[in-house]
Image (cartoon, helix red, strand yellow):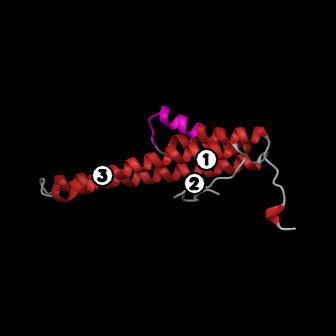
């Protein structure tokens, strides 16, 4: 028999709730603390991973995925922040002449930050829905740093 024709057992409802709760919890805590990407999601996902890693493979897999994604988003946000500081410094150090280059790059930087926030929000919601349906989900643009 081929593996694709074998019926897949759906994870238990408790596993799906923990997995979906990880993604939703990361989103809610990050939005409540005004951290648009990163640390708050890492705290929630890391906590769920530590609690569930030995008893529930499905929930632990989703928590690890959310942990890596939120950590990646935090690192991307840090890169955007440092880039913004460099552009500001370039403008100040050149007494404003650098603004000719910094202004268009700054606008691109703002667009990048908005795109990052939208990606983070949409992917978190999609991951929660997939987890609730008992499916696995891999976030895009995720650095698999912990694993």
Tag 3, which secondary structure?
A: helix
* Residue at the (14%, 57%) spot, across then down: 94
Q: Please tell me whether residue 111 is drawn above or below residue 5 in the rendered image.
A: above
Tag 2 residue? 139
Position of residue 13 measured from the top left corner of the image (x, y, whole percent):
77, 38
Position of residue 5 measured from the top left corner of the image (x, y, whole percent):
82, 62
Position of residue 117 measured from the top left corner of the image (x, y, whole percent):
44, 46
Regarding residue 115, the answer to whether it shows in the image is yes
Q: Which residues are magenta?
A: 25-36
Query: From mark 3 to mark 1, how far is it between C-alphas?
Result: 30 Å
Position of residue 58 measured from the top left corner of the image (x, y, whole percent):
74, 49
**View extreme (bottom): residue:** 1
Neighbour class for label 2 at 10 Å: few (<14), some, many (≥20)?
some
Instruction: Check the picture and name the quadrant holding the N terminus.
Output: bottom right
Q: How many marks?
A: 3
* Residue at the (57%, 58%) spot, across then down: 145
**Residue 17, labelled with which disc?**
none
Q: Magenta stretch containing residue 27, yes or no? A: yes
Query: From mark 2 to mark 1, how far is it between C-alphas?
Result: 8 Å
**Is there CB contact under 8 Å for labels 3 and 1?**
no
Neighbour class for label 3 at 10 Å: few (<14), some, many (≥20)?
some
Tag 1, which secondary structure?
A: helix
Q: Nearer the viewer, mark 3 or mark 1?
A: 1
* Residue at the (18%, 54%) spot, across then down: 91
Q: Toward the viewer: 19 or 54? A: 19
Q: Please tell me whether residue 91 is drawn above or below residue 117 in the rendered image.
A: below
Between discs 2 and 1, the one toward the N terminus: 1
In the visual, does 94 lie left or right of 67? left
**Is there CB contact under 8 Å for labels 2 and 1?**
yes
Query: From mark 3 to mark 2, how far is it between C-alphas?
Result: 26 Å
**Residue 127, labelled with which disc?**
1
Tag 3 residue? 84
């Amino acid at each position: 028999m081929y593996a694709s024709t074998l019926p897949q057992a759906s994870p238990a409802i408790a596993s799906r709730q923990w997995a979906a709760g990880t993604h939703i919890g990361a989103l809610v805590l990050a939005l409540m603390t005004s951290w648009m990407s990163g640390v708050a999601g890492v705290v929630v996902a890391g906590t769920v991973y530590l609690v569930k890693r030995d008893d529930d493979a499905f929930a632990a897999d989703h928590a690890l995925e959310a942990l890596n994604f939120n950590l990646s988003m935090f690192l991307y946000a840090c890169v955007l922040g440092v880039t913004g500081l460099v552009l500001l410094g370039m403008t100040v150090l050149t007494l404003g002449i650098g603004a000719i280059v910094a202004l268009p790059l700054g606008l691109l930087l703002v667009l990048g930050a908005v795109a990052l926030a939208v990606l983070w929000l949409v992917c978190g919601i999609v991951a929660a829905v997939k987890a609730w349906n008992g499916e696995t989900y891999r976030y895009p643009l995720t650095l698999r740093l912990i694993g």
